[in-house]
């Protein structure tokens, strides 16, 4: 019997899409096994509305150290990963911060350490997935999430994927369960530029796999690889029409927002930004690296929100009908420093995670923060 399941991640919160856009979602029901639906859920057509970030209504958490990913919990609260020490924190519904545990095997250094989190829950279990740098590679592990809210702990870890090349930079690291119920994993080229164009190498890719770590049915090459030619993807999300989007760090010139299609090649290292080459897929938006350095992204209705690190702003992109409408709009520019992650909430708000304590920012007295940002619909 298939168990009813729910999933949440830093890049995708399916219920939030439905609540914020006014559409309904028929959720697939994956189990904690190698099986899951092979087609995306049906969705009603969203209203012709896009969303802009309004005011910051408060700080939900402060004093975080190099936070990387945030996962909302049902009933309030959240789980937050810290890159340097490998710890997972619980933000309780009452606003307290406590330790859930440390992911075993995390070896931090440079930009590597504990990265993305994703949560898969069934009627009788909850599994927390984590992407992290180990001694010799990057890995994805899952751990039972035990206990009750306010007293959560981590059970024994099981590695479901290893062998992803790691380095001091370009390690990717975002996890998200997609609308189809499968686990998507973003990897960087780990300074091995040619890896992105090698379909048999896990580096420089977006991967799609089952909850057990096996290649998901329907993948274009029959492996875990979903798309290739990426330099360093750190954000993935799905808009209300089911379109998948990914943020990508460029080298010296252009950062990117890409519309992700299975089997597509996004060109790195042959091209950076919009190249107009028939051999590769161009980004739908490009930014100067000083304006973005995009990390986590969130989607609400047809709007994609992109958290910028070096750019210190939250970019908002209207993607009605799968195309970019108008010019991207910046919010929070310079107000809170580096922004690492963005997550959509069912109550119509956005959570934004700052990242000023990672060695590249200028920490303020209460950094790092988890901010709550109101969203404003616009026709």
Image (spheres, rainbow, N blue to C red):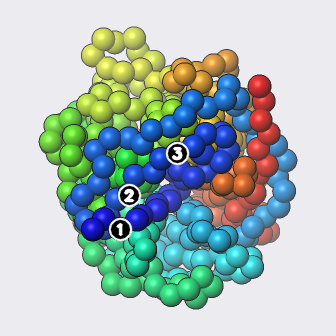
The residue located at (50%, 59%) in the rendering is 8
Marks 3 and 1, how far apart in space?
18 Å
Question: In front: 14, or 298?
Answer: 14
The residues tagged by marks 3 and 2 sit, at their Cα atoms, a distance apart of: 12 Å
Q: Position of residue 349 (x, y in %)?
A: 73, 51
How crowded pointer 1 is (Cα within 10 Å; few <14, some 14-19, many 20+) is rated as some
**Where 217 sits versus 114, above or below?**
above
Image quadrant occupied by the N terminus:
bottom left
Query: In the displayed structure, does residue 161 sit left or right of residue 47?
Result: left
Which residue was labeled with disc 1? Answer: 3
User: Which residue is the site of mark 2?
Assistant: 29
Q: Quadrant of residue 300?
A: top right
Q: Is residue 63 left or right of residue 177?
A: right
Marks 2/1 in contact by CB < 8 Å: the verdict is yes
Q: Position of residue 202 (x, y in %)?
A: 23, 48
Q: Which residue occupies 47% across, 47% down? A: 26
Where is 136 relative to 245, above or below? below
Give residue 109's quadrant in the image.
bottom left
Q: Foreground: 215 or 170? A: 215
- At label 3, counting other C-alpha atoms closer than 10 Å, the crowd grade (few under 14, some 14-19, many 20 or more) is some
Residue at the location (84% across, 56% down)? 57
Mark 3 and mark 1 lie on one chain; the one further toward the N terminus is 1
Per the image, the residue denoted by label 3 is 25
The count of marks equals 3
Q: Which residue occupies 34% across, 52% down? A: 182
Judge left or right: residue 216 versus residue 116. left
């Amino acid at each position: 019997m298939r168990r009813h399941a729910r999933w949440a991640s830093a890049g995708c919160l399916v219920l939030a899409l439905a609540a914020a856009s006014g559409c309904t979602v028929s959720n697939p029901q994956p189990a904690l096994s190698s099986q899951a639906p092979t087609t995306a859920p049906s969705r009603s057509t969203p209203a012709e509305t896009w969303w802009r970030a309004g005011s910051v209504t408060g700080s939900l958490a402060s004093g975080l150290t190099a936070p990387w990913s945030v996962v909302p919990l049902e009933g309030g609260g959240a789980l937050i990963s810290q890159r340097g020490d490998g710890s997972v924190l619980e933000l309780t519904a009452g606003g307290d911060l406590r330790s859930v545990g440390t992911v075993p095997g995390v070896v931090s250094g440079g930009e590597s350490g504990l990265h993305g989190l994703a949560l898969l829950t069934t009627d009788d279990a909850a599994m927390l997935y984590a992407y992290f740098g180990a001694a010799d590679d990057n890995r994805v592990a899952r751990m039972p999430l035990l206990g009750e809210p306010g007293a959560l702990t981590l059970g024994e870890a099981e590695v479901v994927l290893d062998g992803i090349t790691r380095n001091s930079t370009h390690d990717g690291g975002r996890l998200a369960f997609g609308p189809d119920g499968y686990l998507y994993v973003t990897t960087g080229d780990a300074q091995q530029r040619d890896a992105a164009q090698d379909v048999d190498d896990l580096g420089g890719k977006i991967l799609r796999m089952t909850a057990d770590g096996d290649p998901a049915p329907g993948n274009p090459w029959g492996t875990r690889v979903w798309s290739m030619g990426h330099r360093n993807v750190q954000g993935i999300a799905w808009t209300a029409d089911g379109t998948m989007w990914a943020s990508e760090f460029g080298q010296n010139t252009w950062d990117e927002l890409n519309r992700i299609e299975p089997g597509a090649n996004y060109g790195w290292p042959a091209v950076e930004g919009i190249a107009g080459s028939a051999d590769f897929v161009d980004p739908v938006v490009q930014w100067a690296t000083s304006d973005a350095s995009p990390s986590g992204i969130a989607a609400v209705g047809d709007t994609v929100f992109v958290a910028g690190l070096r750019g210190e702003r939250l970019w908002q992109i209207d993607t009605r009908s799968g195309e970019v409408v108008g010019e991207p709009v910046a919010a929070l520019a310079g107000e809170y420093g580096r922004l690492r992650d963005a997550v959509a909430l069912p109550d119509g708000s956005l959570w934004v995670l700052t990242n000023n304590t990672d060695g590249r920012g200028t920490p303020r007295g209460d950094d790092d923060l988890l901010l709550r940002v109101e969203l404003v619909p616009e026709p």
